[in-house]
Amino acid sequence: MNRVSIIFLILCIVVFSWQCIDPPLGPILPTWDVDVSFPLGNQHYIMKKLVEKNPGLINVDDNDILFYSFLDTLQNKPIGSIIRLKPEPSEFTLTVGTLPLSPPDLDFGVAVGEYIGLQAGYSGPSPGFAPVVVSGEMPPVETVNYMIVDSGRMSISVINKSGVPVELPDGFSVVNRDDGTAVGYATFNEVIEPGDSARVSFTLEQTRVYHKLEYRFAFSSPEDDFVIIPDESKLGLSIRFDEIIVNDAEARISDQTPSAYYNGTIVVDDSTYISEARFSGGFMEVNFENMAEIDLPVTIAFPALRARNNLSQRFSRTLTLSPGPENNFSIDMRDWIVYGNESKNSLNYTVRFESLNTANDFGRFRSTDTIRGELRTRNSPHDFFVVEWIDGIISPKQYDIDLQFDLQLGEIADIFEGEVEFDDVQLTLGLFLTGGFNASANIYIVGKNKHGVSDSLLIPEEKRKITAGDWSIINFTKMNSRINDFLNTFSPHFPDELFITSHLVVNSDYESGNIDVNDALTVSLEMEVPFQFGLNEGVVRDTLTVGNNGDDLDRDLFKYFNYGQMYFETVNGMPVEMNLRINLLDENGMILRQLPLSDEPPVAINAAPVNSSGYATGTTGRDVRMLELSEEDIRILQETDMTELMLFLNGTDKDRTVVFRSQDSVKVNIFATFNVKPDFN
């Protein structure tokens, strides 16, 4: 410092040294052998300001007692896909069985004039004639190559166009032309007069009938007084197939429907009974194997499956099965709902044949022809049905819970730590489960702080029942739980977060109800902690900038300081004893020195007077403590940019509960004074 500056400082000190003042809050520059004050921290901690800085978090009750209050509501993830139904595979076999066929009638005529012995146009008496055997080929059965008739009848009609009375004494035989095997035989017992007809039939049972047939019969004529022989003397024949049921055939089949059908059941879940259900995923695979030699049209139907966008539409699928195993399709369960299932654990289905039609081709059909089928869930993308909504009875399902509540401690967690024995903590947990199934809760409230300390509370057994659609309220107090011990576990640091974890068991009582994929558990958490507790070794930290109102002291002046003292001025209006230390910090917040030194006793601050209820009833009054500063202390003060105040709090009796009210406060003013003796040389 140059000589002009020194002289200027001397003039200033001459003017100001005549004034008697208290230790200042701002720096005063000395110019003579006098004292200069250097403010290090001046704070008035009022509990009311804690309320103002933390609105809604720190509150004041009717007795002016502070209490921490937290309230938040969170919703757990939706229930989603916890209900998954895995149908058991269902197999079925359906045999075609016998089939009705309707071969066309065979109409033809047999010329018999040569056997009568009378010329065409003759009229007069007829002498008659003895039996004559007639045989020949019938018209082919156009729609049949062969058929084995399980049951039915063949009818033979004879129209007498010969002009003479006719008898068929030996009956009428039908045989297969290919191998001569008999088809059937019928007897005509009466005389068929000219112009009349007669009809007889015989039963077909396990009878083979080929495409080509032959007839065989003998006919005769009795004497007659008067006959007229037509130009074409013949017998008109008509062969008719009645109620033909076949068990083997090679034929053109048109619009014939086997009567066989199959009623089956697929068990959706052995412990889940469905009245109605919607699905968000899952496929049912339907596999058919056609073991016949012809296409077989079938219909599979699920009476309780309705189209999701049209409840009047029941599931029914018709497909034509080609011979072989590759006849498959899938049902996307997202497009269908179970409706009106009468709370079953299964779905009924039917398989039936539709009308066969081999068009113009001959097809081989046998009554033993079989289709085999299987219903199962598809393996990809998953092998189960994912329920979106269900009404009925479901087996108990586990619903995991994972919620995190941030307790929003704010500056409380940043500036305070200590051994606190809470006296009257109250925690209220609310649980609301949407849907129509009750649940049982096996829930833990887990607390954690930033230092890794954790503890948990378990919902009491008698409170674990959750009624769907209604709030379940669980109160934790010191009378019914270990809530105080729970919170005290974290001392000296408060928990930062509370977790609601573990799980619910939905429909634990296995009752009827309903649930939706979007149903969820809503959890409300409310906690109140009165500032009414036992306190031991609590610490409040506060970092301050050196100086006051932005003023600063020229640090070059420190080389003129001879010695100094640090003063700790306090007024305590809180119901706890305190010890005070100060950390000198550089511009980066690093500790340069602690005063008093760690091996020296701290500055003691007496507790305010306290009544029997733990309330502070006044203050300690102004108390000033002085600490001599060494040359090293003064050198470090030259480098100090910030100070950290540390107030160590203790109740007057660590087992005694103290109460903090909004009016409680403590004043702390810390400053240093230095003696200056300028060097005029």
Image (cartoon, helix red, strand yellow):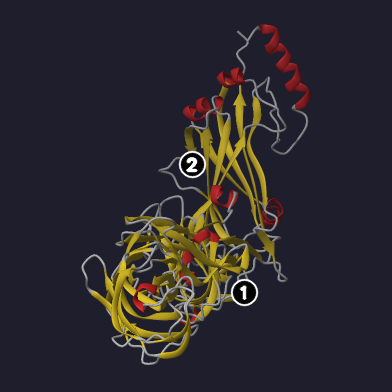
**Amino acid, disc 1:** Ser
- Residue placed at 73% from the left, 71% from the top? 62
Residue type at numbered disc 2 = Pro
Q: Where is residue 144 in the image (x, y as percent from the top left)?
A: 36, 64
Which residue corresponds to mark 1?
613
Position of residue 15 relative to residue 428, above or below, is above
The answer to whether residue 462 of the structure is visible from this angle is: yes
Crowding at label 1, few (<14), some or many (≥20) Cα neighbours within 10 Å?
few
In terms of image quadrants, where is residue 47? bottom right
- Please state which of residues 590 and 583 is positioned toward the viewer in this rendering: 590
225 or 591: which is nearer to us? 225
**Dividing the image into 4 quarters, which one contains the C terminus?**
top right
Q: Is mark 2 on a helix, strand or loop?
A: loop
Q: Position of residue 55 (x, y in %)?
A: 70, 55
| Label 1 SS | loop
Q: Please indicate whether residue 406 sits to the left or right of residue 119 in the image.
A: right
Residue 202: image quadrant is: bottom left
Task: List x then y, in percent, for residue 679.
Answer: 60, 13
Query: Disc 2 designates what residue?
Result: 596
Quote the CA–CA distance across marks 1 and 2.
34 Å
Image coords of residue 615 (percent x, y): 64, 68
